[in-house]
């Protein structure tokens, strides 16, 4: 085999791998969007007093035993944003969405949407809000970009669905 043939073969294999990754990525993104919609549909508003917030390992977070049993073993050592909050007379540890973690005040009262033990969004914040750290790490920058792209993708999907519904309504007439 000559050098050109080897280069062509490597390029073809790389292109095939990229196409496969693109297809798998799209499927995973659609799955994540549907799961997010399910979480938001099941969310309930609650008023809570935030005691503390930390990013810690799932094992050390003090989450219910059932949650630890249902999660994959590889996720037990992953670091999650955990919020310790007083909801009514009960003190609970909640898993927080990374996009709203910085918005939550420590020693402050908030109205939030909670789905199970997952803190989905914050509606109203009472109390002092700490200033966000000026320097962001690589992970938080990537998470911000991911959130932006997910919002763009969701808007495109909604536009496609609206277009399809309009087309079907036009077809029925």
Image: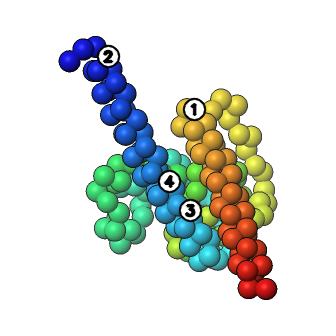
Rendered location of residue 162, percent (x, y)? 73, 70
Cβ–Cβ under 8 Å for marks 2 and 4: no
User: For the residue labelled by badge 3, is the local secondary structure a helix, a strand or a loop?
Assistant: helix
Seen as rendered, the residue at the extreme left is 1
Count of numbered marks: 4
Mark carried by residue 82: none
117 relative to 26, above or below:
below
Would you call the spot at circle 4 few (<14 residues within 10 Å), some (14-19), or many (20 or more)? few
Q: Give the distance between the C-alpha atoms of the residues marked 1 and 3, in whole angstroms.
A: 25 Å
Q: Give the distance between the C-alpha atoms of the residues marked 1 and 4, in whole angstroms.
A: 26 Å
Using the rendered image of the protein, determine whether residue 158 is visible from the camera's viewpoint. no
**Colouring of the image:** rainbow
Residue under circle 2? 4
Check the picture and name the quadrant holding the N terminus: top left
Residue at 52 percent across and 61 percent down: it is 30
Q: In this rendered view, identify the residue nearer to me: 121 or 156.
A: 156
Q: Give the distance between the C-alpha atoms of the residues marked 2 and 4, in whole angstroms.
A: 33 Å
Residue at 58 percent across and 51 percent down: it is 98
Seen as rendered, the residue at the extreme bottom is 173
User: For the residue labelled by badge 2, is the local secondary structure a helix, a strand or a loop?
Assistant: helix
In front: mark 2 or mark 4? 2
Residue under circle 1? 137
Cβ–Cβ under 8 Å for marks 3 and 4: no
Mark carried by residue 33: 3
Q: Which of marks 2 and 3 is nearer the N terminus?
A: 2
Q: Give the distance between the C-alpha atoms of the residues marked 2 and 1, in whole angstroms.
A: 42 Å
User: For the residue labelled by badge 1, is the local secondary structure a helix, a strand or a loop?
Assistant: loop
In front: mark 2 or mark 3? 2
């Amino acid at each position: 085999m000559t050098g050109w043939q080897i280069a062509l073969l490597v390029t073809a294999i790389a292109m095939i791998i990229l196409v496969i990754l693109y297809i798998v990525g799209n499927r995973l993104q659609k799955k994540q969007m549907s799961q997010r919609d399910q979480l938001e549909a099941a969310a309930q508003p609650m008023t809570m007093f935030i005691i503390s917030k930390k990013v810690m390992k799932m094992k050390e977070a003090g989450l219910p035993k059932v949650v630890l049993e249902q999660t994959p073993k590889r996720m037990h050592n992953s670091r999650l944003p955990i919020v310790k909050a007083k909801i009514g007379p009960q003190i609970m540890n909640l898993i927080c969405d990374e996009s709203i973690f910085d918005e939550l005040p420590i020693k402050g009262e908030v109205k939030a949407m909670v789905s199970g033990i997952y803190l989905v969004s914050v509606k109203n914040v009472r109390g002092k809000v700490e200033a966000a750290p000026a320097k962001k790490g690589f992970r938080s920058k990537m998470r911000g970009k991911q959130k932006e792209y997910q919002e763009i993708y969701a808007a495109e999907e909604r536009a496609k669905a609206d277009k399809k519904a309009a087309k079907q309504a036009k077809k029925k007439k």
